[in-house]
């Protein structure tokens, strides 16, 4: 029994480990994979998809308004007091001017039937079908724009994690170097070749390096949390990013080719404004269609029974059929200018939509030129910060050598280390700025 239990335990552990390894593999992402994952799991995207589905149903709802509409009805009535009518007394041989109360009907009656309505002509219906299709187009474009925004946000978060992790590596190297300096200084102090102040100064350097590591680790946790949130990953899961920072930086640092223009008409923002213009035009036509007549046809069929007994469904109780067919025509004649005011408002809204579309052409062009200038500036800033970082490291290394040989003071060493950490922080900031400017440019030209 113990052997079987042990075997089962071993198998369980194996499957758990296998499942854990599989889950871990599932959470390794390149940037493209992270963006694709976000498009499938983001709640914002899911809601956009539901909007598209709702718009599809809206189209059918509008179409169905012009199709046959069938309704049924049934009634069962008991009169507590039958209606009374007054009949002139002359009909019954009474004196003129007198009236005799007479009850017509029976205590119980019931009827059932159905009605078929069919719209024959309605200008607003014709316009409404076109509007519903444009509304569906708008919902689809809104989903597309949401996808672009999600991919942009995922890329920003992905780059933030990579930059923070790279910064942590440098801070850990700096901590190892500071600890070595502290140990060497302490040994020199114990042998009478250094002062206690130098030991304390080195200890300060170690503590500063430890604080920088804690800060870098917090930045990584925050960046990963933002990335998980953007992707729709559970916060308890562990993400592994499989691409390196230089894989994104190197292509941007090569000799730049001349960046041409772009087709703003294909940009999602322009297309959405064009769809909005079409919607405004449909609303304008819808307002004008209210001047047109409306024509519909109907057919009604019913059966009715009467009796003084509550049970009207006996075979002996007769049911009387009735049916009719007809048309309804509604013609607007005079609304005291109300409809004209509605038409004018729709016309103004359409003109505004046209103006917004023209403005979008200039805005997109401005955003494109701004994005091009930003990425060029970001490349220059990054190269400058790389040089500054290398120079700060060179000064720090030389000062360390001088300090070990008794030429430089511990205060000077502390200052050069601070200068190097600041240069490293500036480098991290320029990395993020450069990568963000690249995805902003991609977004501006509609390539996300």
Image: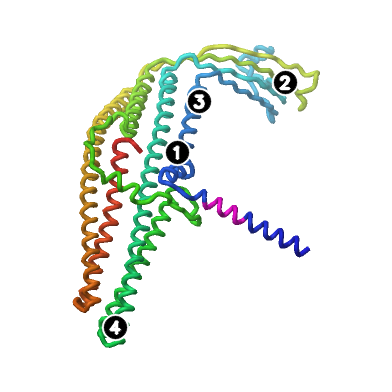
Tell me the SS state at disc 3.
helix
Given this view, does label 3 or label 2 mark the residue nearer the observer?
3
Q: Which of marks 3 and 2 is nearer the N terminus?
A: 3
375 w.r.t. 85: above or below:
below
Q: Which of marks 3 and 4 is nearer the N terminus?
A: 3
Given this view, does label 3 or label 1 mark the residue nearer the observer?
1
**Camera-side residue: 394 or 289?**
394
Number of marks in picture: 4
Determine which residue is flagged by label 2: 306
Is 21 contained in the magenta span? yes
Determine which residue is flagged by label 1: 48
Tell me the SS state at disc 1.
helix
Q: Earlier in the sequence, mark 4 or mark 2?
A: 4
Q: Which of marks 3 and 1 is nearer the N terminus?
A: 1
Tell me the SS state at disc 4.
helix
**Camera-side residue: 402 or 76?**
402
Tell me the SS state at disc 2.
strand
Determine which residue is flagged by label 4: 188
Is 4 contained in the magenta span? no
Determine crowd level at label 3: few under 14, some 14-19, many 20+ residues with C-alpha closer than 10 A: few
Given this view, does label 1 or label 4 mark the residue nearer the observer?
4
Q: Earlier in the sequence, mark 1 or mark 4?
A: 1
Range covered by the magenta-colored residues: 16-24
Find residue 264 and report its horizontal and vertical position in percent: 28, 31
The circle on residue 60 is: 3
Q: How far apart are marks 1 and 2 (CA)?
A: 57 Å
């Amino acid at each position: 029994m113990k052997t079987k239990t042990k075997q089962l335990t071993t198998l369980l552990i194996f499957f758990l480990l296998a499942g854990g390894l599989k889950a871990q593999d599932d959470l390794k992402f390149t940037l493209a994979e992270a963006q694709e994952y976000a498009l499938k799991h983001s709640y914002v995207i899911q809601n956009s998809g539901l909007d598209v589905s709702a718009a599809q149903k809206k189209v059918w709802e509008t179409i169905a308004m012009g199709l046959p509409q069938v309704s049924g009805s049934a009634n069962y009535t008991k009169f507590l007091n039958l209606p009374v009518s007054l009949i002139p007394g002359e009909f019954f041989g009474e004196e003129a001017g007198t009236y005799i109360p007479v009850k017509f009907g029976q205590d119980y009656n019931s009827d059932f039937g159905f009605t078929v309505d069919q719209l024959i002509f309605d200008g607003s219906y014709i316009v409404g079908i076109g509007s519903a299709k444009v509304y569906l187009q708008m919902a689809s474009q809104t989903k597309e724009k949401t996808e672009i925004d999600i991919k942009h946000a995922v890329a920003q978060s992905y780059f933030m994690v990579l930059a923070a992790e790279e910064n942590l590596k440098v801070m850990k190297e700096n901590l190892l170097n500071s600890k070595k300096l502290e140990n060497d200084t302490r040994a020199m102090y114990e042998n009478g070749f250094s002062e206690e102040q130098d030991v304390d100064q080195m200890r300060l350097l170690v503590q500063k390096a430890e604080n920088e590591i804690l800060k870098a680790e917090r930045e990584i946790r925050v960046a990963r949390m933002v990335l998980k949130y953007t992707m729709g990953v559970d916060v308890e899961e562990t993400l592994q990013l499989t691409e390196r920072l230089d894989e994104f930086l190197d292509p941007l640092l090569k000799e730049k080719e001349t960046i041409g223009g772009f087709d703003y008409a294909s940009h999602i923002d322009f297309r959405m404004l064009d769809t909005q213009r079409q919607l405004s035009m449909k609303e304008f036509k819808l307002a004008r269609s209210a001047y047109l007549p409306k024509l519909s046809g109907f057919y009604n069929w019913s059966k009715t029974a009467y009796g003084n007994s509550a049970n009207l469904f006996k075979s002996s109780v007769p049911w009387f059929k009735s049916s009719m067919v007809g048309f309804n025509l509604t013609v607007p004649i005079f609304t005291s200018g109300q409809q004209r005011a509605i038409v004018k408002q729709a016309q103004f809204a359409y003109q505004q939509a046209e103006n917004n579309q023209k403005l979008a052409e200039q805005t997109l062009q401005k955003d494109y030129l701004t994005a091009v200038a930003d990425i060029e500036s970001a490349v220059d800033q990054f190269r400058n910060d790389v040089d500054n970082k290398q120079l700060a490291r060179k000064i720090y290394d030389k000062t360390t050598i001088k300090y070990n040989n008794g030429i430089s003071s511990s205060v000077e060493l502390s200052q050069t280390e601070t200068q190097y950490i600041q240069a490293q922080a500036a480098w991290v900031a320029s990395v993020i700025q450069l990568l963000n400017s690249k995805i902003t440019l991609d977004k501006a030209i509609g390539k996300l």
